[in-house]
Amino acid sequence: MQRVLLVVIITLFSSLNIYSQAPKKPNASEIYESIKKLNFLGSVLYVAAHPDDENTRLISYMSNHVKARTAYLSLTRGDGGQNLIGPEIRELLGVIRTQELLTARQIDGGEQRFTRANDFGYSKHPDETLEIWNKEEVLSDVVLAIRQFQPDIIINRFDHRSPGSTHGHHTSSAMLSVEAFDITSKNTAYPNQLQQTGLWQPKRLFFNTSWWFYGSQEKFDKADKSNLLEFDTGEFYVSSGLSNTEIAALSRSQHKSQGFGNTGTRGSQMEYIELIKGDIPKDKTNLFEGIDTTWNRVNGGKAIGNILQQVEANYNFTNPSASIPELVRAYQLIQNLEDLHWRNYKTKEIKNIIYACAGLYLEATSETSQATPSETVKLNLEVINRSSYPIKLETIECNKTSISKQIALTENNGFEFQEILEIPSNQKPTTPYWLTEKGTLGMYQVSNEALIGKPETPRVFEVSFKLLFNNTPITFTKSVIYKTNDPVKGEVYKPFEIIPEASVKIPEKVIIFENNQAKDISVIVRSGRDNLNGSLSLNYPENWQVSPAKQDIQITNKGEEKTVFFRVTPPENQHEGHLIPVMTVNGKNYSKELIEIEYEHIPYQTVLLPSETKIVRLDIQKRGKNIGYIVGAGDVVPESLKQIGYNVSLLKPEDINPETLSQFDAVVVGIRAYNTLETIKFKQQQLFDFVFNGGNMIVQYNTSRGLKVNELAPYKLELSRDRVTDEFAKVKFLAPTHPILNTPNKITQEDFKGWTQERGLYFPNSWGKEFTPILSMHDKGESAKKGSLLVAKYGEGYYMYTGLSFFREFPEGVPGAYRLFANMLSIGK
Ligand SMILES: [Zn+2]
């Protein structure tokens, strides 16, 4: 709730003061812009696939210049991307990117929606995408978004007519949007939705094209543009002192996990949209042509429009509170509108404007940031009217009880109250709603239909302040938040969260047993309250042994952690399973891990996920002991190699010299090292000499663009963009008798089972005759790709290049990936 309110309170120019969760405090110019927006009744829905696909220039332009209600529907939350700012990947990255989108929208003035589709990783074609997503469910969510948001205009980021030319998620987003356009007004389409929303027919659908989609600027200049609308999105907003393009850059820069920091530009900036459905406007700059975007479009709206036009015309920048009487009159009329959609949306808008005009400040802060079920929490409430308009505080509602106050809020006299918030014993903990149930590779599972599409879990604890403006009651509801003073940062806001009384975790998510020796595994229990007493045990697979069976745990303080160890003994033969810690407190079992996500640019988040560690008893032989690892873009391969018993030394380019190299049996080059290490080119010859003298060198994937060396290998080797994204793709052995498939581990089809996300990427497609290609594989409908693993003898040693995704498979504990890599390290030894 908090979030939705914040987005609406200030739809504009709020870029100047972004701080996670802090309430917005609009100035006189910002209030004026909100009044103009209040008088515009039209909306735009922008549709794409991922966080960061959206064109913030266009969203900001629609929201801040056109004054349309504007939203971005991102089909996914971006779980499949990379994280350039921290260790979170997959669902936790999706949580970060969700918040990055929300922060971006606060800046550019848009709203944010999602579907249940999961970003499962790269997909070459929409056919594949729509097979892995549940197409019907995603289409249903797009239809729901349109019916709920009621856009006049839909703009797709991608072209639905060019499957295969971009990420399959991208094309799918456009295809689903086009398909939805034709059915949202039909009551035969997803009739179950009609209990919570009505039918809706958008007027036009566009594709947000640019010269890029035409191949070149010249081609675009020559192209027929009769079906295109154009806007200059370089508008300068005097009221904020920013160009639209500067706001767009600030918004885009919130995609920090993707490294999308963006420097603003100034001056003219053309944007083009191509009509896909609906009629083409005569005025090629007016996408709302033929749509009444005044108050007249709503039955009963004319009188409201008359009042609010006057409010806009007579607005006093030095005294916004002078507008309150007329705003309150319009507010009353809005309450009588029959059209629920406009009534609800415009009520929110006008309440925020009245609030800002009166300089009202209403806040409910908790004395603690985290509480557990059954706890009572002290709340501090602040109420102040900073205008001369007479307002009365009638009641405050907390814990569903109304407390009579009857206080006249005279100008600039603040009031503070204390209340006690009782957390129900059955209160669910705070966590992203889409991660509470087990989904599929392509879909989140969301049983509560009311939550589908929402950007985040609504906050449950709220305080309502019922105020009287003259005799008109207006209730403002505020989510309970936590506020503290940081000696360095000053005022810091955090969400108020409910956490379980106990949470558990095993720090390592995959533990490899390379032989039958037992390992001591640490388990951490964290207490959500004072004086926690319970017992901790581990669930483990058959044939494994764990001791002790149980350990008593006592923790005195809330927030404190305790670490204990269990001895885990693997079976004789290859086997895998999971360890699940279970903390039992008064007969209740807790086996979830509490994960905190804390970054400066997004609100603090807690996520509860099942605590589960994969344990693998590997049947693995290996030769050689010491490995030098040249760190590239970053991966966990070194930790994984340590787990199977290698000594791994991390190397930077400056550490590479013949003497250091002579200690190693093999050198492994981390992912994209030749893309990211500027000075590695000076060491390439020394690495080749190391191989010539009997060392093994394994180079993992690089991209062909931006290579820092001319010679990747001692022989001819050319990279391509070939990749095999289907992790189940059949693997054919091209050189079945080659030692790399036979010693010391016999590699079979079994070793290519259980791979995740993909087989590999950026395979070479051309190589010297010295190389032996070992494996062949391909995605559906494509030719065989033979460059995933190439081996060449060079002098006394071996040079190997591989695009296989070991960096993804190791952290998932895929046995075959370890066994094959051990053979690569062992070759010739
Ligand atoms: Zn994308």
Image (cartoon, grey):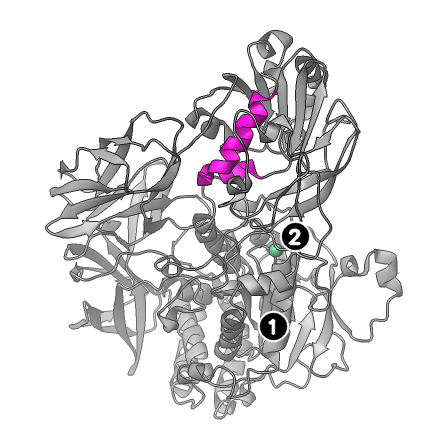
Depth check: give the residue in front, 472 or 104: 104
Which numbered disc covers residue 779?
2
Secondary structure type for disc 1: helix
Task: Place residue 663 in its image quadrant.
Answer: top right
The residue segment tinted magenta is 805-827
Extreme top residue here?
Answer: 659
Residue 84 appears in the picture as rendered: no
Q: Residue at x 64, y 70 (%)?
A: 175
**Residue 228 image position (x, y, % from top left):** 77, 72
Residue type marked 2? Asp
Please indicate whether residue 457 sits to the left or right of residue 30 in the image: left
Quadrant housing the N terminus:
bottom left
Tell me which corner region of the image, top left, top right, bottom left or bottom right, holds residue 742.
Answer: top right
Name the disc covering residue 177, or none.
Answer: 1
Spot the residue most to the front. Answer: 737
- Nearer to me, 20 or 431: 431
Q: Quadrant of ligand 1?
A: bottom right
Q: Is mark 2 within 8 Å of ligand 1?
A: no
Spatial CA distance of label 1 from label 2 is: 27 Å
386 versus 751 height, above or below: below
